[in-house]
Image (spheres, grey):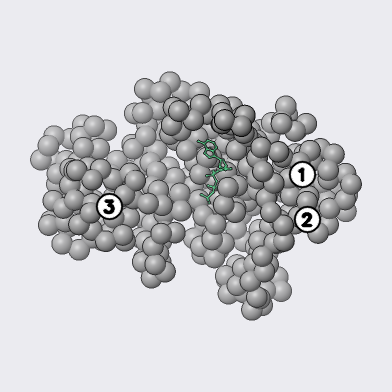
């Protein structure tokens, strides 16, 4: 652990009580044969009602671990150790800490007010139940519907996610559906109890580009209609530019920068964010009014992410940072508020300001 670990960042929202979810100083570590690894450290962000926060970062940066920690879905065998807070405003207005609540209470929230969809629906759909039975089961459990009302609800949900011939599909098994249809079923299942927060972990990555666009458009429409908030995990900044309201950039288990999407694309502050945006084709940047965006070539950031087993003593990005200086290697910079809904973890700004 680094010197910063003892001083965690408080929830980062500037208007207390306005957010649907306020995460503060969330850290998750796992026991492995080679020792305990810190997969996520001091993660803080806020999601407002009806808004989408995109969590972006390279593979292994801790996006999925953050989502699974919020849902309380780590396998028991992983011996996950979690600290921090995640204040969630329930439908009845009560503010509860997702990380501190008893498992039974959490189970009642999951699939109800709090739902999640994954990249590969086959891992979460039950292969031996029809898609209708799966949606109906959730409606019976959480909405206390009787059998026939729940079955009718399942069909309506399939219609809502624009599955053609829903009356017939409701009686089919997951393996009878295409990848895009299965992802729609996952969304129907997640939406069955009208969640107020949906966590979507790379929900379209496994699909081809046309189907991806359809699914993203569908999710955008459902969000508008229901007013739910969304945590959208992705490594695709083009998707962020088009669909998210706010964005938090993760690097090696930590948030390095967060902002409203337009602000981040127009004025990226962290050298890592600048590197990521340089990798983005001009069209997505222009959509967000990014300064000086042209038809850029895709550029990869040189170097590799440090191993979570052996993190560097200071800023984890320092070994790859073009503007690093000696102070960057002495202590992990803190995530600091630098404006309305803007956070930055970098000492460069203090030095150059
Ligand atoms: N159960 C576990 N036990 C040990 N290490 C884990 C466990 N789950 C995740 N990790 C490690 O935590 C780190 C973060 O993983 P995570 O899956 O959150 O990354 P990610 O940003 O979601 O990547 P991707 O985009 O590839 O899904 C990685 O180094 C991963 O190997």
Q: Which residue is mark 3?
A: 185
In the image, is residue 247 above or below residue 108? below
Q: Is mark 3 within 8 Å of ligand 1?
A: no
Q: Position of residue 251 (x, y in %)?
A: 65, 48
Of the pair 352 and 169, the residue shown nearer to us: 169
Ligand 1 lies in quarter: top right
Q: Residues within 10 Å of mark 2 (few under 14, many from 20)?
A: some
Q: Secondary structure at mark 3?
A: helix
Q: Position of residue 1 (x, y in %)?
A: 71, 31
Q: Nearer the viewer, mark 1 or mark 3?
A: 1
CB within 8 Å, label 1 to label 2 = yes
Rounded to the nearest angstrom, the CA distance separating label 1 from label 3 is: 42 Å
Say whether disc 3 or disc 2 marks the residue closer to the N-terminus: 3
Say whether disc 1 or disc 2 marks the residue closer to the N-terminus: 1
- The residue at the point 49 percent across, 47 percent down is 231
**To which quarter of the image does residue 291 belong?**
bottom right
Q: Which residue is mark 2?
A: 321
- The residue at the point 31 percent across, 61 percent down is 180
Furthest residue toward front = 33
Q: Which residue is mark 1?
A: 315
**To which quarter of the image does residue 148 belong?**
top left
């Amino acid at each position: 652990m680094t010197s910063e670990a003892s001083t965690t960042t408080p929830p980062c929202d500037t208007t207390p009580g306005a957010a649907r979810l306020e995460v503060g100083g969330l850290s998750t570590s796992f026991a492995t044969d080679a020792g305990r690894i810190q997969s996520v450290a001091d993660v803080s962000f806020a999601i407002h009602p009806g808004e989408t926060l995109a969590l972006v970062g390279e593979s292994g940066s801790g996006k999925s671990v953050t989502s699974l920690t919020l849902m309380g879905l780590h396998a028991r065998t992983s011996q996950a150790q979690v600290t921090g807070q995640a204040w969630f405003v329930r439908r009845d207005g009560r503010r509860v800490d997702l990380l501190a609540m008893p498992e039974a209470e959490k189970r009642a929230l999951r699939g109800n007010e709090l739902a999640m969809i994954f990249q590969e629906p086959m891992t979460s759909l039950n292969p031996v139940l029809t898609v209708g039975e799966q949606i109906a089961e959730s409606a019976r459990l959480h909405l206390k519907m009787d059998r026939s009302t729940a079955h009718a609800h399942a069909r309506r949900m399939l219609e809502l996610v624009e599955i053609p011939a829903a009356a017939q599909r409701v009686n089919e098994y997951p393996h009878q559906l295409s990848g895009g249809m299965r992802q729609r079923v996952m969304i129907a299942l997640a939406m069955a109890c009208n969640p107020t927060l949906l966590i979507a972990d790379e929900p379209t990555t496994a699909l081809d580009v046309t189907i991806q666009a359809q699914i993203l458009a569908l999710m955008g429409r459902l969000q508008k209609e229901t007013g739910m908030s969304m945590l959208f995990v992705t490594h695709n900044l083009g998707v962020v530019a088009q669909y998210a309201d706010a964005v938090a950039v993760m690097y090696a288990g930590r948030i390095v920068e967060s902002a409203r999407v337009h602000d981040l694309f127009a004025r990226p502050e962290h050298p890592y964010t600048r590197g990521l945006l340089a990798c983005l084709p001009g069209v997505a940047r222009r959509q967000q009014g990014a300064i000086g965006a042209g038809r850029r070539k895709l550029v990869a950031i040189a170097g590799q992410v440090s191993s979570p087993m052996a993190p560097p003593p200071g800023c984890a990005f320092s070994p790859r940072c073009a503007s690093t200086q000696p102070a960057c290697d002495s202590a992990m910079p803190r995530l600091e508020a630098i404006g309305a809904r803007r956070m930055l973890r970098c000492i460069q700004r203090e030095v150059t300001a």
